[in-house]
Amino acid sequence: MAPVVLAIESVHGFFYNLVWMKLDEKSASHAVMMPEVIFIMNILNNRKPSWFFYLAWIGLHAVGAVIAWYMTWAAVSLIQNVIGSTILVDGRTRIVEDFLFMYLLFPFMGLLTGIVQYTLLRHYLPRMAWWIAATVLGWTMPMVIGRIITPLLERGNSIFPIMLGMLLIGVIIALPQWWLLRQRVRHASWWILASGLGWSLIGLLNQLTSEPSYVLMVIGLLPAIAAAAACWLMLDRLPSYDLQVAQR
């Protein structure tokens, strides 16, 4: 996974220095290597995320989702080559692809989403080393408590239970991240609200539309768009932290 991290770091570092920092060539090279210096400079200059931050947020989430999808299919294919196309679960024969796909997709999504968000947020929030782990945990938790959510998602064409189930998924995913955010920004609860709203809208629109798969992929970006809105509120519009937070 190191090449993925390095690739995202390189792309983001280049555009960050080009569009945001506007440093000379020597300073830019140090900025990529020393994110903690960038963070302190942002606090001292009261620097807010620019429009590029939010475009990068949504765009990199889309790229990460596609990569996670292909990683999941590759993992399922490898497992099928080892154990075959079916598996016995609770005395029932299940198709490996159908049974394992979501159990693999969510952790992969958590990993790549965590890398993307950490790469962008670390310039504005202190002590973010645990963000990737918190994101993976959040994306894994719905799998653990799926017995509560699954009945809501399997109620045919009833919109409200599906929206409620998707809302719970969004809230659960956001909880570990909120635990870290609440120590770094005011109004961290916006993160949970945005995640729940984004996921519930997925449930609503998927029920109301029969559009092609590319439209559904755009709909799948709603949580990322909602999270970008939460970042805008926490980092730009609402009162922010001061330098003392960064020095703890």
Image (cartoon, rainbow, N blue to C red):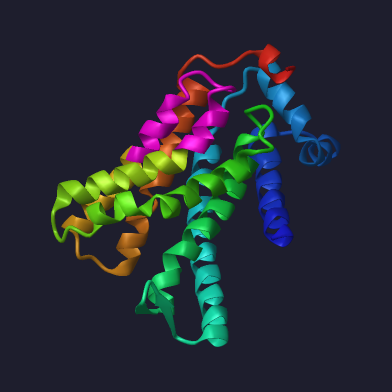
Specify whether 150 is left or right of 115.
Answer: left
The percent coordinates of residue 190 (x first, y second) are 41, 27
Give residue 195's quadrant in the image: top left
Q: Nearer the viewer, residue 194 or 53?
A: 194
Q: Residue at x 58, y 22 (%)?
A: 183
The percent coordinates of residue 231 (x first, y second) are 48, 31
- In the image, residue 29 sits, relative to residue 244, either above or below, namely below
Which image quadrant: the N terminus? bottom right
Looking at the image, the residue that sits furthest to the left is 158
- In the image, residue 68 sits, relative to residue 171, either above or below, namely below
The percent coordinates of residue 176 (x first, y second) are 52, 37
Which image quadrant: the C terminus? top right
Q: Is residue 188 visible?
A: yes
- Is residue 200 within the magenta segment? no
Q: Residue at x 31, y 62 (%)?
A: 215
Looking at the image, the residue that sits furthest to the front is 91
**Span shown in magenta:** 175-196
Q: Residue at x 57, y 54 (%)?
A: 112
The percent coordinates of residue 157 (x first, y second) are 14, 59
Q: Residue at x 56, y 49 (%)?
A: 136
Specify whether 119 is left or right of 59.
Answer: right
Q: Nearer the viewer, residue 159 or 80?
A: 80
- Is residue 187 within the magenta segment? yes
Give residue 126's quadrant in the image: top right
Looking at the image, the residue that sits furthest to the right is 26
